[in-house]
Amino acid sequence: MVVKGRDRAEVAALFKVSVRAVDSWWARWQADGRDALRSRPRGRRVGEHQVLSDAEQAAVRRAALDHTSDLGLSGQLWKRG
């Protein structure tokens, strides 16, 4: 839209983002073209910077699920989805 002459503020309002976001998109587009704007996975990869071992994680899960009734909770405390 900026390429077609639209004002940055107008583009920001249209996409409900800040003008800084539009400026960032524009700079990336100018540097690397359309591919620079493609969505990419965010955050850490599974297991990266993992503090607890798999066995320790399982022990924490077991302990939490075994004691939900002691806490007055029913069902699972969380689930990974």
Image: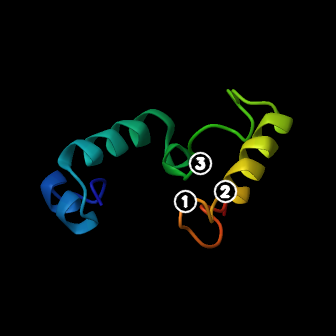
28 sits left or right of 66 in the view:
left
Looking at the picture, does residue 80 appear above or below residue 27? Answer: below
Question: Does dot 2 land on a helix, a strand or a loop?
Answer: loop
- Image marks 2 and 1: residues in contact by CB distance under 8 Å: yes
The residue that disc 3 covers is 40
Q: Position of residue 4 (x, y in %)?
A: 28, 60
Looking at the picture, does residue 30 appear above or below residue 67? Answer: above
Residue flagged by tag 3: what amino acid is it?
Arg
Residues 46 and 74: in front is 74
Question: Does dot 3 land on a helix, a strand or a loop?
Answer: loop
The residue that disc 1 covers is 71
Q: Residue at x 69, y 27 (%)?
A: 51
Residues 54 and 61: in front is 61
The C terminus sits in image quarter:
bottom right
Q: Residue at x 18, y 52 (%)?
A: 8
Query: CA–CA distance between discs 3 and 1?
Result: 40 Å
44 sits left or right of 58 in the view:
left
Question: Does dot 1 land on a helix, a strand or a loop?
Answer: loop
- Image marks 3 and 2: residues in contact by CB distance under 8 Å: no
Q: Position of residue 18 (x, y in %)?
A: 21, 50
The N terminus sits in image quarter:
bottom left
